[in-house]
Amino acid sequence: MNDISRRKLMRAGVVALPGAVGLAAAARIAERNGLVPPDHSGLYGPGETLTYAAQRVLTAHSLAREFDRSQISKKPFANETPKKTPEFLRLEAAGFVDWRLKVDGMVARPAEFSIAQIRSFPAHSQITHLACEEGWSYVAEWTGALLSDVLHEVSMRPEAKFVVYDCMDKGWWESIDMADALHPQTFVAYGFNGGELPVAFGGPLRMRVPRQLGYKSLKYITRLTVTDSLKKFGKGLGSAEPEFGYAWYAGI
Ligand SMILES: Nc1nc2c(c(=O)[nH]1)N[C@H]1C(S)=C(S)[C@@H](COP(=O)(O)O)O[C@H]1N2
Ligand SMILES: [Mo]
């Protein structure tokens, strides 16, 4: 750790003092700085708070590693595809022309975007690593719009702190903070390795959050909700994952 980042960490007070007293103190300081993750109250809560607050203070603007074309995985592995609902099958059969991304919550202009409208935002590409918490991973090229461009289009209110996202896969939902939502590598992705994003990999549109584990990169997204609090969503833990014992913040 260099001197500047150490100083930043100390200024925010998120210093890893040894033992439970240190964790409690760090948690209090994190709270004062608005850096408490939504799943802070469980068994691993103090550790989650420390990890999240320290990463946000030290690496809020860091970039995920990008790879060369030659490093793209020959056989990327798609997680099991969900049992498609009749609605999903209907949208897929029609080439997703009726699919919409709804954007609502703390925004001045709630909107619904077709896939053509999402494609009309400036296109960006990245070759990044997608790592599942279960141990497998792959490198692929993703093409999409910056999530920040979509959010600017609807004009977020200044109190906004998180973006919650839903998908066509029952039970799956996620959220990220503004450091990730506005990050230049966070995409709503519709392209994969130079072609269209296959349904197996989350088409027509998936979230791509390369600074966090794979489960934050939700597939088949249909809705973004901008909010200042995660308490009213699901069990209030920020996403479906903490309900099963995984961390809301899955920074890598
Ligand atoms: N809708 C939806 N999104 C999802 C999942 C899922 O089952 N359904 N799995 C998540 C997990 S755990 C991982 S690791 C990645 C896997 O991405 P892949 O299918 O492209 O390999 O997608 C994430 N997004
Ligand atoms: Mo995963």
Image: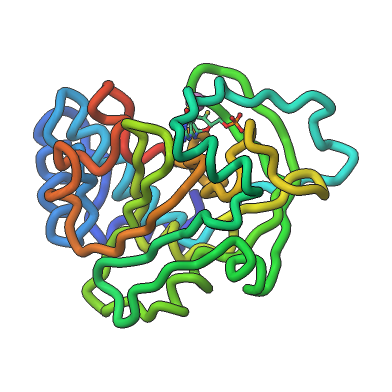
Q: Residue 93: percent from the left, percent from the top?
A: 62, 41
Q: Is residue 99 above or below residue 67?
A: below
What residue is at 12 percent from the left and 34 percent from the top? 41
- Residue 93 is left or right of residue 55, and the answer is right
What residue is at 55 percent from the left and 25 percent from the top? 81
What residue is at 15 percent from the left and 45 percent from the top? 27
Q: Is residue 120 above or below residue 71?
A: below
**Can residue 22 be seen from the camera position used here?**
no
Q: Residue 7: percent from the left, percent from the top?
A: 36, 61
Q: Which of these two is toward me, 62 or 220?
A: 220
What residue is at 70 percent from the left and 67 percent from the top? 123
**Can residue 76 be seen from the camera position used here?**
yes
Specify how the rendered protein is coloured. rainbow
Q: Is residue 101 above or below residue 151?
A: above
Q: Which of these two is toward me, 152 or 55?
A: 152
Q: Residue 56: percent from the left, percent from the top?
A: 37, 54
